[in-house]
Amino acid sequence: MANNHPKVFCFWKACQVDSCGDFLEQAILDEGIEKGATYCDIRIGESRGTSIEVKDGELKKASSGEEKGAGIRVLYNGAWGFFSTNEISRQSLRNALNNALLSAKNGSKLTKEKVHLCNVHVIKDKIVWKPKKDPFDIPIVEKRKILADVDAAIHEIDGVHTVTTTYTDGTINTHFLNSEGSDISTEITRTMAQVNLVAREGANVIGYRGRIGGTGGFELFDMFDPVEKGVKLGESAVRVLRAKRSPNGRLPVVADHDLTGVFVHEALGHATEGDLVTSGDSVLEGQLGKKIAADNVTIIDDSTIKNAFGSFPYDDEGVCGERKVLIDKGILEGYILNRETAHKLGMQSNGGARAESYAARPLVRMSNTFIEGGDYSFEELLEDIDYGIYAKSTRGGEVDTTKGSFQFSAQEAFLIEKGEITTPLKDVSLSGDTLQILKNIDAVGNDFVMSDPGFCGKGQLVPVGDGGPHIRIKEAVVG
Amino acid sequence: MNSMIDTATRIVDLALKKGADEAEVFFCKSEGKGFMIEKNSISSISGGVEKGIGIRLIKAKKIGFAYCTEEEKADRAIEQALSLSKLGKESEFSFPAPDKTDTIDNIYDARIVGFTDEQALEGISTLIDSALEVDPDIVISRGGVAYGTENFAIVNSKGLEVEDKGTDIHAGVSTVLRKNEVSTGFENVSSRILDVDFEAIGRRGAELALTGQNAKKIEDKDMTVVFTPYALSSLLEFIIAPVLIGESARKGESVYSGKESEVVASEKLTIVDDARLPGGLNSAVVDDEGVPSKRTELISRGVLQGFLYSQSSAIEYHTASTANAMRTARFSSARSYKNPPVVKARNIYVEGEVERVGNLINGVDEGVLVYEILGAHTSNPASGDFYVNCSILFKLEKGEITYPIKSAMLGGNLPECLKQVNGIGNDHKFLAGGLSPVSFFIPTVSLDGIRVTG
């Protein structure tokens, strides 16, 4: 995986002072400060995109559009106010500013703990992550052809009943300015295809799904073949359709990269989010420096990985994206932070502030979260298992970070008996306890793969990546 | 309000002028406010206004769609939609004709439109104080109050011209109590009118956490599960709501396919989709393509009656629209002008012979009372199988609530469980969906057929 050292990349660009500041935006910030705010920022988001859906060879939906809007944040007397609008005019932005100020003033009367922001560099930068094959330039019939090809290929598989494929692309241009002098423009394109299929035999019916894509354009479909992916999904679905139910109880589990990714995201990632840590909502509060996982576990959240779905150059507070070591050889080394939570913890922001769009205020979010590869080959992982489960592919999971309990699902599974993969099994879900299960990872594979695009919800949706090698969990609750 | 219809009409006319055979414009404006609570304190106040236009058109019997945010950009959006329409296949689809609509009660409250920051902050203060009165160590780790107003207008080239407006308010808390151990609680309330009891929300959220102290583990066993409304809504949203969609059912995508007029659930169970429900979170005079809202019986005393359709799927399957067209965003419970309408359940209402929740509990020999589940969205709607984690639940033994449980997994097949309904409560609650625009008016329900793993 390509991994530019983020700080070098950003500062080099920062030397080219690019006066992309619009007078209107700067005037709004100045007005905010004049009216008593201690900090203001504005994000203007402009986006365009296309989405197509094909079901069983027929085009069901084709839509396209553009949107532009602004979100203004102010800090007044230690309280946040935020207001957004999708009308960009002087009057409308001033109204938004005044609303944000009024909100902050009102909030400050009841706020028990004043908000402070850690210091960050003032950055002036313009970054365009131009895709090699910009979807904007690709004729729509080509986009539809990808779906039609995937649809046709999956329908060839005996047992596949219906196939719904969706293609989505979007380019978001964000202009961020704050009252400290930062002025950053970024442009990011993401492209993705999704398959939802139903396999059926008599009364027996199951669903299966998968995605492909990332940050980038049509070149992603050269890197990851959608037809090949679709066929694998179809084959898995039919295998699951005909499979037996999994045994349940506490069992050793080997997880593939897709499942490992969601496991890391749910079991650990959320609990490291700075806002949950500082509001009493995380079992990892106060655990920095403590051993919370097995020695072979190193978990990273990295927003700089080329083509990964959760990558971005700067977060929504103008802080450079970076590679964050969350767990290093079992020890909790860091949290994901924004400026406010970094200040509360006496640390530095590491670029964790993300908003779904200009219309939402940034929250602490993950980017691309994964376990680093270790030493074991896949066969070695299986060797020591007398009776267990090999679980693959996922529909996602969910976590209660306060108690540390989480659930995640595998779309497909197999029995492991005496070190060999044997009987195919139906989908399973696994659950566990964060502080316990991380210590139960007793072997980490050497076959790291960044997994498929994902979406994380926390009141707002953001695109994320996750992944890892195969891992072996000594014991998980399987149902 | 006339100006929204006027704007939409002008855009429909422009689309026809530019070559569309039929056209439809959905124009909506919304505004909202949100107060976020973190650690017993207000942490931020947000607000926003948004307007958007969704344009659907038919040319040479093919459909295209595009969106924009202002009338000035409609010309370009129409061109995009015309261009996209060339991709599609010819269909018999035509926009709905105008039809009589009736007003619906309790979906617009001027008091919400006029709700001030001061009033909201006062409510939140009350909420926080009442939680702390239950136990001074309670922390509302996160919570919030959000409310908003939405106006929309739909105009199409068949002469349909309709508009409606609505308000809503949501308040909720997540509570944490660290005493002998960490226990959690929550309470959430959604309504179309200003009838939120802030004191009750804070108190109930805190009480749930308090009663969760001294939790024990339980043995793995099949047992009765009594789902409170919020927990039940998660399962219904991801497993039942998707398979009630006509197109999906008629294509054989679920266990309900082909079972019309058959017994698919307990005779104690009636499930209705009622977009005319007073106060229903998705209630409006029309659906998102202007068809007057209806009440549709889906399962009646255990017998499957039918499914949900929009205008296009109704035409395809030779039936009538059940007014279930909704314009939604991916994984969101909010409406969005950026997408053409798809079929979604609007207000799922569980009816039947109802009884007091106390009676439901008294009738349980061994079981669990479940408040919250994690992972329902990972269920398999085609098969109906689910395996979810419960983080807040209590043991039921011989009709009594005996002790809180640390956590457990619940596994089963929901359509099968719905055949084993022990009883339906009378504590109906309005609940919004988590990751889709579906909403609910549902009570506590007691079911069998579930394996509980400790």
Image (cartoon, coloured by chain):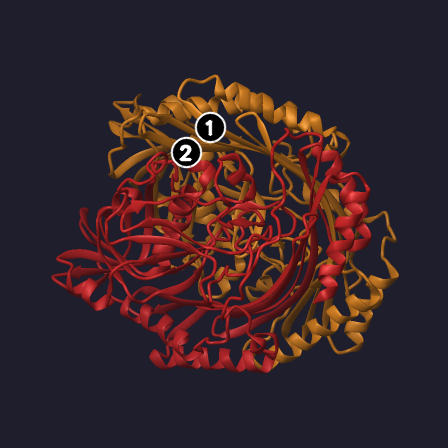
Label 2, on which residue?
A: B253
Colour orange maps to chain: A
Question: Residue B259: horizontal and vertical position, in percent?
Answer: 32, 37
> In front: B257, or A160?
B257
What is the chain letter for disc 1? A
Q: Is residue A377 something one can see in this rendering?
A: no
Q: Position of residue A258 (x, y in %)?
A: 47, 34
Quadrant housing residue A202: top left
> Mark 2 Cα within 10 Å, few/some/many (few <14, many 20+)?
many
Q: Is residue B358 above or below residue A410?
A: below
- The residue shown at (64%, 29%) is B90
Q: Is residue A310 left or right of residue B125?
A: right
Judge left or right: residue B106 versus residue A96: left
Residue at the image point whose x is 48% and y is 71% from the top: B39
Give residue A260's position: percent from left, percent from top.
Answer: 44, 37
Q: Could you say which disc has been placed on residue A162 in the image? A: 1
Q: Is residue A364 left or right of residue A196?
A: right
Q: Dot 1 lies on which element?
A: strand
- For badge 1, the amino acid type reads Thr
Marks 1 & 2, CB-CB < 8 Å contact:
yes
Task: Give, as a three-letter code, the residue at label 2.
Answer: Glu
